[in-house]
Amino acid sequence: MRISELSAKSGVAIPTIKYYLREGMLHQGEQTAATRAEYDETHLRRLRMIRALLEVGRLSVASIKKVIAAVEDESLPTHRVLGTAHYALSPAVDPEQTEEWRSARALVDDLVTELGWDITEEAPTRDELAQTIVRMRQLGLSIDLAPYVEAARRLVSEVEMDVIPFDGPRDAAVEAMVLGTVLYGRALDTLRRMAHESESARRLAP
């Protein structure tokens, strides 16, 4: 397909496609003339992944380039590729040099060990959860995360991981993982707030 058709099918403007080509985020098409190239389904799939990372994941161009580099590195197993995208989705958290922080981080590390979860030491989610625990303690909230752990485990192992196409192109797997992580996460948060309203009405409304 020509670049105009690629633009129409992907919903990405031609100038933006050309920018991705210049930045190396999108691989070059097959040159058929001095000013003409042909593109195929691999280009369409890559554009879909970029859009998912940019529009849904809200990643910077620099972060997207890191994910693309991982996708294109055939020496990396798919688990590492998905991990690169997962880590890019995590908000930046600066560890606090306080005893309160160290205690929270130790709690997270102990929880990971107790659950037998295979989470790398440098996973940003460890610090993200530690920061949340610090704030919960400061506000006097309960730190009983067991119900949330079980809900997360079941959602991921019984639902979410089953819809990622591990046997297909890695671009498609990354796209599915990003869309699922972000959009289903938003849906879950919205449903919880709706459930809060309904339960409040049941308990308190006259």
Image (tube, rainbow, N blue to C red):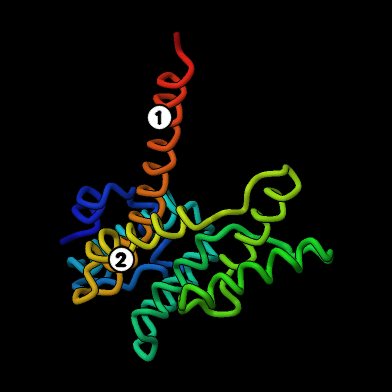
Q: Which residue is mark 1?
A: 194
Dot 2 falls on a residue whose secondary structure is: helix
Quadrant of image for the N terminus: bottom left
Q: Can you name the residue that lies furthest to the left here? A: 1
Query: In the depicted view, which residue is nearer to us: 188 or 116?
Result: 116
Which numbered disc covers residue 157? Answer: 2
Q: Position of residue 194 (x, y in %)?
A: 40, 29
Q: Is residue 4 above or below residue 200?
A: below
Q: How would you rate the neighbour count of disc 2 (Cα within 10 Å): few for under 14, some for 14-19, many for 20 or more?
A: few
Query: In the depicted view, which residue is nearer to us: 65 or 154?
Result: 154
**Residue 20 occupies quadrant:** bottom left
Query: In the depicted view, which residue is nearer to us: 39 or 96?
Result: 96
Kindly identify the residue that appears in the image at 59 percent across and 79 percent down.
Answer: 121
Q: Is residue 75 left or right of residue 108?
A: left
Q: Amino acid at mark 2?
A: Ser
Quadrant of image for the C terminus: top left
Kindly identify the residue that appears in the image at 66 percent across and 61 percent down.
Answer: 130
Dot 1 falls on a residue whose secondary structure is: helix
**CA separation, marks 1 and 2?**
25 Å
Kindly identify the residue that appears in the image at 33 percent across and 55 percent down.
Answer: 180
Q: Position of residue 198 (x, y in %)?
A: 39, 24
